[in-house]
């Protein structure tokens, strides 16, 4: 109950602060630029599958900034635990992005419905999308100065860079490495890149809405587990360190 | 430092129990083996300059920070998360969520503290009335002055009717009127019987509000005293009188270089019990109306400076004049080596006892004559 109240508290402050105007403008721009043309469900989910994660990155960063201020000592002093505090920020960010998703869906449904999109399809496509929004919000939370110290943040960012490195370390560059080095790099890339698989496949699942194989359900489970792991890691990290909000 | 045991004997129920607490930020030590006990119902003032670690100590007590070493128990529990609903906290800076009105804000905070329904409504209205913000309760906090925000801080801390109040620099950044307002408010709050731990660098707040004072220096409690003991001692004084004629002024000033007269009073600086008694006797004999006898230098200030800088006794004090009584009942933890036995004043070396003693002695002598 405290979690929901704190989430409501954060959301209301976000709305009243006027910061939500950015999300509103971005949502309107998204609609008018991309969703007014004749479209099918695949196009609709492709567009939203890119828009919502980007919005999630932005909104979570702003919400974290809102939570990382001296004001925040007061709710903590009133029995909001550290875990509840982080989850409240996370849920607030997700609620805003999912709200934007809802508005775009509503706009499309009323003004320019995708030709082959039923309500059932909309739910099936939305589920992996929501999980991806959560994954990105949770990753942003983990990488915030509130949760991890600078050294740890650099480490996590390094691992993420390594996970994506197969896109830019290849070809001639890779051939220049000795065989053992190439094998090691591929192994490390595969290892640290494995958490990205559910997110990428989740996007694909949202676009295709193909739940005919068990892989689809396994991926949803993987997305959910990854999300829980990221949140758990954030809560654990914050529980182990001093709470020192930014003085700004 | 042995104040722990001695206070434990004095206070059966200690609300704050801190033993050998260490806290460092990286390689920078802030608190070093700090030990402290505060009894139930006591108002404890922690004095210290900026950067001494007062806020760090309060944040440790709130569980925002983790100690590197040592023991910290509040309300009988080492689990600070569990006892937090019984603790009220007033932060140093008046930083609150300004998008809300005071009433909305207090309702949210009350809900976070587990209050609901009628109890929540009643508490919110009661505390708004306590701090005098009822009329402005529906105004956005963004329009509040610093003084109003500090009063809101008091209201939010009282919402859950806490057993312990932790107050960090309550008058910091306020103008004189605001400071007075907040001190009066806290004096009223004190009368409710909460245990209060007040951090400040304003001596006046401690003098007006506290039962006991500690000075934080070098990462530990460098000195500690009961306010009633400090109030009993004084150093340089000013005797305010109705009027002083030039003849009497000359007589008084002939007593020595430490007697300074003007038309409305006599300043004895540095003072001695003998000198003070002589001057008072002369004033009484001359039938001069004595209006007040005021300490010029607060004993608390002496204690503070002594703890902070190990200020040595002045030559007058070294002659056995007015030092605070440096025994363990008054000063639990001197900053360095305690003053030698020779420097400790006799038990009668307090302003009041000296005056009374002199009067009785003089009276006795008169009767004999």
Image (cartoon, coloured by chain):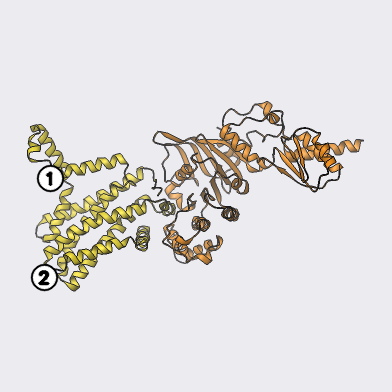
Q: Position of residue B227 (x, y in %)?
A: 63, 43
Label 1 to label 2: alpha-carbon separation: 35 Å
Q: Position of residue A46 (x, y in %)?
A: 14, 60
Closer to us: A231 or B130: B130
**Tag nearer the camera, 1 or 2:** 1
Q: Position of residue B237 (x, y in %)?
A: 72, 40
**Position above or below: B170 against A174:** below
In this view, the residue farthest toward the bottom is A110
The answer to whether dots 1 and 2 both sit on one chain is yes
Q: Please identify the quadrant where the N terminus of chain A is shown.
A: bottom left
Q: Earlier in the sequence, mark 1 or mark 2?
A: 2
Left or right, A189 with reference to A82: left
Find residue B95 and name its label. none
The tint chain B carries is: orange
Where on the picture, by quarter, is residue A95?
bottom left
The tint chain A carries is: yellow
The local crowd at label 1, few if under 14, some if 14 to 19, many if 20 or more residues have their Cα within 10 Å, is few
> Which residue is depicted at the point 16% across and 71% down?
A112
Q: Chain of mark 2?
A: A
Left or right, A8 with reference to A55: right
Left or right, B143 with reference to A208: right
Q: Which residue is mark 1?
A: A167
Q: Is residue A128 visible in the rendered structure shown here?
A: no
Q: Is residue B171 visible in the rendered structure shown here?
A: yes
Left or right, B134 with reference to B274: left
Indicate the secondary structure of the residue bearing disc 2.
loop
Indicate the secondary structure of the residue bearing disc 1.
helix
Q: Chain of mark 1?
A: A
Q: Which residue is mark 2?
A: A115
> Which residue is depicted at the point 18% across and 47% down?
A195
């Amino acid at each position: 109950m405290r979690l929901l109240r704190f989430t409501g508290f954060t959301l209301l402050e976000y709305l009243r602060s006027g910061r939500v105007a950015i999300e509103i403008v971005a949502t309107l721009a998204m609609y008018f630029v991309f969703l007014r043309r004749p479209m099918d469900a695949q196009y609709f989910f492709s567009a939203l599958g890119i828009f919502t994660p980007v919005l999630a990155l932005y909104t979570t960063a702003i919400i974290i900034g809102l939570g990382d201020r001296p004001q925040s000592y007061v709710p903590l002093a009133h029995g909001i635990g550290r875990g509840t505090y982080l989850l409240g920020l996370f849920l607030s960010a997700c609620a805003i992005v999912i709200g934007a998703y809802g508005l775009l869906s509503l706009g499309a449904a009323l003004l320019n419905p995708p030709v082959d999109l039923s309500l059932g399809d909309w739910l099936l496509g939305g589920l992996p999308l929501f999980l991806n929004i959560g994954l990105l919000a949770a990753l942003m939370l983990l990488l915030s100065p509130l949760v991890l110290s600078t050294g740890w943040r650099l480490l996590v960012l390094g691992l993420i860079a390594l996970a994506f490195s197969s896109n830019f370390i290849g070809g001639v560059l890779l051939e220049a490495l000795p065989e053992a080095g190439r094998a090691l790099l591929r192994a490390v890339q595969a290892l640290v890149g494995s958490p990205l698989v559910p997110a990428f496949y989740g996007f694909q699942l949202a676009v295709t809405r193909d739940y005919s194989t068990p892989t689809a359900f396994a991926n949803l489970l993987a997305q959910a587990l990854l999300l829980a792991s990221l949140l758990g890691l954030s809560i654990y990290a914050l529980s182990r360190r001093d709470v020192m909000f930014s003085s700004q | 430092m042995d104040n722990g045991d001695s206070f434990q004997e004095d206070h059966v129920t200690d609300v704050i129990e801190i033993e050998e607490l260490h806290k460092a930020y990286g390689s920078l030590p802030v608190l070093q083996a700090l030990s402290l006990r505060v009894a139930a119902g006591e108002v404890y003032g922690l004095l210290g300059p900026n950067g001494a670690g007062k806020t760090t100590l309060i944040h440790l007590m709130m569980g925002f920070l983790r100690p590197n070493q040592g023991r910290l128990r509040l309300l009988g529990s080492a689990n600070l998360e569990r006892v937090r609903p019984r603790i009220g906290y007033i932060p140093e800076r008046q930083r609150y969520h300004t998008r809300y009105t005071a009433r909305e804000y207090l309702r949210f905070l009350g809900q976070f503290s587990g209050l609901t329904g009628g109890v929540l409504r009643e508490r919110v209205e009661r505390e708004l009335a306590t701090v005098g913000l009822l009329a402005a309760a529906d105004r956005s906090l963004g329009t509040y002055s610093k003084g109003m925000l500090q009063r809101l801080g008091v209201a939010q801390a009282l919402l859950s009717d806490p057993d312990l109040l932790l107050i960090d620099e309550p008058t910091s950044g306020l103008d004189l009127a605001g400071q007075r307002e907040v001190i009066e408010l806290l004096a009223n709050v004190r009368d409710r019987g909460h245990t209060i731990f007040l951090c400040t660098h304003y001596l006046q707040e401690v003098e007006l509000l506290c039962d006991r004072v500690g000075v934080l220096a070098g990462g530990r409690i460098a000195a500690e005293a009961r306010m009633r003991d400090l109030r009993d001692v004084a150093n340089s004084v000013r005797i305010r009188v109705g009027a002083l004629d030039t003849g009497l002024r000359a007589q008084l000033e002939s007593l020595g270089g430490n007697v300074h007269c003007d038309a409305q009073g006599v300043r004895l600086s540095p003072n001695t019990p003998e000198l003070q008694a002589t001057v008072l006797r002369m004033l009484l004999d001359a039938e001069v109306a004595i209006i007040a006898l005021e300490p010029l230098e607060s004993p608390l200030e002496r204690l503070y400076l002594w703890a902070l800088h190990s200020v040595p006794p002045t030559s007058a004090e070294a002659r056995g004049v007015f030092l605070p009584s440096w025994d363990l009942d008054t000063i639990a933890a001197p900053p360095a080596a305690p003053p030698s036995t020779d420097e400790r004043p006799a038990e009668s070396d307090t302003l009041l006892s000296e005056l009374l003693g002199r009067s009785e002695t003089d009276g006795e002598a008169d009767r004999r004559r």
